[in-house]
Image (cartoon, coloured by chain):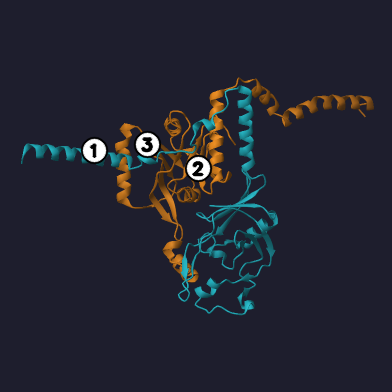
Amino acid sequence: MFFKKQQIVLILCGFLLYAVPCSCEEKHPKAGSDQHQKDKKWDRQRAELEYWLIQAELRLARSEELYLVLNMGRKEFQLKLKGALVWNYPINIVDTDSQELKEFVERFLGDKGRVARCLSGKHLFTAQDKTPDSVLAVVGEVVKVDPELLQRDVPARFQLLWGSGLTLEVRTDIEGKPKSPLKSTLMEFRHALRRPFGEAYLIVKMHPDDAITFYQAPRVGLPSILCPSMLTTD
Amino acid sequence: MKSWLRYITGISVMLFGFLGAWLLITGGEASLHHITLFDDSLSVRLPEDEKQAKRELQKARQALAKIKPSAPYIVIDTHANILTFRTENSILLKATCSTGSGGELTDSNTGRRWIFNTPRGAFRVTSKLVEPWWRKPDWAFIEENQSIPKDPSKRLDPEMLGEYALGFGDDYFIHGTLYERLLGVNVTHGCVRLGSDDLEKLYKAVKIGTLIYIF
């Protein structure tokens, strides 16, 4: 043997003395930052905003209705029902270099940063049929339902509007057929007219499966709140 | 034309022009911008005293944490026909399902009317059944132009619901189906259909009392 028993014990003790504090640090990485948080000065403005957002969410969670949280801290869209997260999707901005996200957040929050909004409109520009009509004709016959009622659109491009020049455009990577072309032209014209007066126009990318939910679930009037990145209420 | 009439016509045209342009720009959305969540904005302000304010904020955080489900829960997305068993941060099971068609049925004899929607809102799993038998309701016979049987045993169907069923709400179930090819399409009478493999996994994972959110 190269080592005597005593030497092995000493090496093991040394290893333990080194390893135990290291593993503790890994298990409690927040301990230091918590202390730092405690030491941080009480930021009343931040606390007031967090308090307002919590109260707003508690109020919305009391109803039976779905509500939308634009969570900038987690960078995701969240649909919630009675306080439970039922759908979420990352905010993938198409043009990441632009100032549009900042403008969108500022405009959404309003002057005092405490504004809840409701969805004032949505418009589907292009979409694909989810199920082939031939299949639905057979299914409709079996289940005794009008096949048209069973059809669902897979949105290729749509917009959600909150008024005050707030527009969120969602694009998927599928090719879609135009839906109500006249209204679409009118919408494009309206945006062109609004732009000089100020408009926050955010374009995001989404997977088609999630776009179905994000287009269909929010009805006009959907309560929406924005949680700025400086706060994480979750 | 008299000059005063010309003025009035000119002003009216201008006013209508402005109104039209305004409606075109705003889309008539001007009155829908904000929601008033709080009647009294003072009620959502923290107390001036720092210690009290911190305590109040902590209380609010706890209240928010309390409304969130503490155990994994089921979410049924009736728009995409997707069922997930999840926590806030992770998806434990994701499956294609079928939900209510939204179709209507009226009994021409009695005038009774059914709308086949999956109910929306928050529910809990109220029962867990193995090898469930379907007790056909009246609409199942009316839909098939059959007479409603007087013998209750003639309403029973041992195969339609698959191997497992999870009860919720007012007599609704998450159950299996003989028509797995139709999963993903809104074809049901209000229940939620799942494929047999996913149904087995879900049945084993959930407990009575598990929360179900349907939207």
Q: Is residue A129 left or right of residue A2?
A: left
Task: Mark 3 vs mark 1: give the one in front.
Answer: 1
Residue A214 rendering spot, x and y as whole percentages: 48, 47
Residue type at tag 2: Leu
Question: Which residue does the image show at 31% across and 32% down from the upper left?
Answer: A196
Picture mark count:
3
Residue B6 sits in which quadrant? top left
Q: Do circles 3 and 1 both sit on a common chain?
A: no
Residue B67 rendering spot, x and y as whole percentages: 62, 43
Q: Is residue A221 left or right of residue B20?
A: right
- Residue B118 makes an appearance in the image: yes
Residue B26 sits in which quadrant? top left
Residue tagged 3? A165
> Of marks 3 and 2, which one's residue comes earlier in the chain?
2
Residue type at tag 3: Gly
Residue A221 rendering spot, x and y as whole percentages: 44, 46
- Residue A74 makes an appearance in the image: no
Q: Chain of mark 2?
A: A
Figure check: B163 above or below A10: below
Residue tagged 1? B18
Figure check: A187 above or below B190: above
- Residues marked 2 and 1 touching at CB (< 8 Å): no
Farthest residue toward the right?
A: A5
Mark 2 secondary-structure assignment = strand
Q: Residues within 10 Å of mark 1 (few under 14, many from 20)?
A: few
Mark 1 secondary-structure assignment = helix
Along the line of sight, the residue nearer the viewer: B80 or B59: B59
Q: What is the letter of the cyan chain?
A: B
Q: What is the letter of the orange chain?
A: A
Question: Alpha-carbon distance for marks 3 and 1?
Answer: 18 Å
